[in-house]
Amino acid sequence: MTTASRKSKPKTPAAYIKAINQYAGREFAADIEWSSSCNPNATRYITNENGASIEDPTGAPGCGNRYYSRDIPRDPTTGAKLERFICPNPNCGASLRSFGNLTRFGPASE
């Protein structure tokens, strides 16, 4: 199935639920789109010396950049999108988390 043959991402939470429920109990196809943002209105998270993600003790905010599927780095071993990555903005360095969203729902085969 091509993604062009499936519908676009639902616009509201209710539409999202309706789109998933129409395939209840059956296989369906969907794409995963990844996104992440570096919130300029909240204290950024950084990676400490133990590799843990913690709130920045200086209270510095995120840089405001947004990242999408094409921007999210992949694990070099598995090829999977990384759940956590460092903000590529050289003036930021926040530890960001990526989130997957299902889009373009359709039947498992057309």
Image: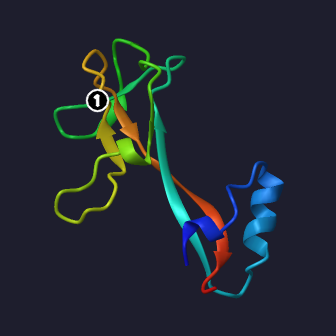
Residue at left 81%, top 66%?
A: 18
Please determine whether, in this image, residue 74 is positioned above or below residue 84.
Answer: below
Label 1 SS: loop
Residue at left 18%, top 39%?
A: 50
What coloring was used for the rendering?
rainbow
Please determine whether, in this image, residue 82 is positioned above or below residue 106.
Answer: above
Res. 47 image quadrant? top left
Q: Quadrant of the N terminus?
A: bottom right
- Estimate the x, y position of residue 5 in percent, counting from the top left: 64, 70
- Estimate the x, y position of residue 104 in percent, counting from the top left: 63, 63
Give amino acid for label 1: Pro
Q: Quadrant of the C terminus?
A: bottom right
Figure disc tally:
1
32 displayed left or right of 75: right
Residue at left 58%, top 69%?
A: 30
Please determine whether, in this image, residue 38 is positioned above or below residue 91.
Answer: below
Res. 26 image quadrant? bottom right
35 displayed left or right of 16: left
Please determine whether, in this image, residue 95 is positioned above or below residue 63.
Answer: below
Q: Which class describes the residues within 10 Å of circle 1: few (<14), some (14-19), or many (20+)?
A: some
For disc 1, the marked residue is 88
Residue at left 54%, top 17%?
A: 41
